Image (cartoon, helix red, strand yellow):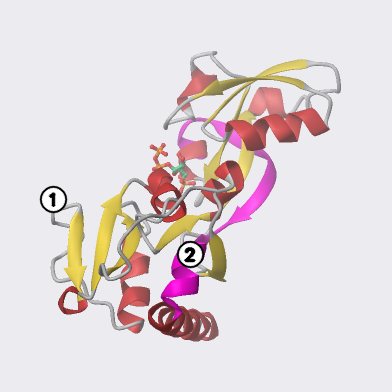
């Protein structure tokens, strides 16, 4: 388990990503009284104060949020379940925020998918950034999967003949459709989770628990309105 060695009197530090979930994240922060002192969409700063300096936000890549929280450089963060399943960081996950909802799917060109799932013992090339989840999925089916690690735009790999399948997030399905790919199966339903460093939870619960409670109430309220 990573060691935490950060001053406990520092501002409560919350790691966020600037990706597409930022719009849905801001109302949840607001529900907990956490108003950034700058526009998080526009600023080029990577650390932004809130709440008169008692709280600060770190603005980082989605894939790095859990790492900052696991190492205690951030006390809490908001991160997709896909990344938690893939990297298994040692963090607490007290709340499903029900934002960033999508699914982790296997997809591929229609003509390949219509031939059926690869048989046990067969070989397949799969482009993904979810190496572990993909390897685990095909191992359980006895399929020899060559994992081709990519960092984005997975949908291109089958079009240029580099892969037979992709394992990637699907939200509206429009990226698959635009690239003539179809879904084969869903591996996991995905949404964003509030994550907390275990040592921070133990030492700063008077600050952290009210934030969890306020966000939980806001998530509940949003659920009742849909
Ligand atoms: C994500 C994902 C898909 C796309 C799915 O990519 O990797 O490519 O969104 O969304 P859709 O079903 O609504 O079309 P993102 O735009 O985050 O960029 P990336 O390819 O760099 O990961």
Residue 126 falls left or right of residue 115: left
Q: CA distance from mark 2 to mark 1?
A: 30 Å
Q: Is residue 62 left or right of residue 87?
A: left
Point 51% across, 32% down: residue: 129
Report the image quarter containing ligand 1: top left
Q: Which residues are magenta?
A: 177-205
Where is residue 211? Give x, y as percent.
41, 80
**Residue 181 shown in magenta:** yes
Pick the front one: 12 or 57: 12
Q: Which residue is mark 1?
A: 44
Label 2 residue SS: helix
**The image quarter in which residue 125 lies:** top right
Residue plotted at (24% across, 66% down): 56
Q: Foreground: 32 or 5?
A: 5
Please tell me the numbered disc located at residue 94: none
Q: Is residue 151 above or below residue 89?
A: above
Label 1: element kind: loop
Of 224 and 146, nearer the camera is: 146
- Which is more foreground, mark 2 or mark 1? 2
Q: Which mark is residue 199?
A: 2
Q: Is residue 194 visible?
A: no
- Residue 125 position (above or below residue 166): above
The residue positioned 41% from the left and 75% from the top of the image is 204
């Amino acid at each position: 388990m990573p060691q935490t060695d950060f001053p406990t009197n520092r501002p409560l530090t919350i790691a966020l990503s600037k990706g597409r979930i930022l719009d849905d994240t801001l109302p949840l922060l607001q529900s907990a009284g956490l108003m950034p002192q700058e526009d998080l969409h526009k600023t080029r700063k990577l650390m932004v104060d809130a709440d008169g300096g008692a709280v600060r936000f770190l603005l980082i890549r989605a894939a790095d949020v859990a790492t900052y929280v696991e190492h205690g450089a951030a006390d809490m963060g908001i991160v997709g379940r896909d990344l938690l399943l893939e990297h298994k960081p040692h963090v607490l996950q007290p709340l499903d925020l029900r934002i960033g909802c999508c699914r982790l799917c296997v997809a591929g060109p229609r003509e390949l998918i219509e031939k059926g799932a690869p048989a046990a013992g067969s070989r397949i090339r799969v482009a993904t950034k979810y190496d572990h989840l993909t390897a685990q999925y095909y191992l359980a089916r006895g399929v020899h999967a060559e994992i081709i690690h990519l960092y984005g735009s997975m949908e291109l790999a089958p079009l240029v003949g580099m892969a037979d399948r992709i394992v990637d997030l699907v939200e509206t399905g429009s990226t698959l459709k635009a690239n003539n790919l179809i879904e084969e199966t869903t591996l996991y339903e995905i949404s964003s989770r509030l994550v907390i460093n275990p040592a921070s939870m133990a030492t700063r619960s008077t600050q952290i628990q009210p934030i969890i409670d306020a966000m939980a109430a806001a998530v509940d309220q949003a659920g009742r309105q849909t």
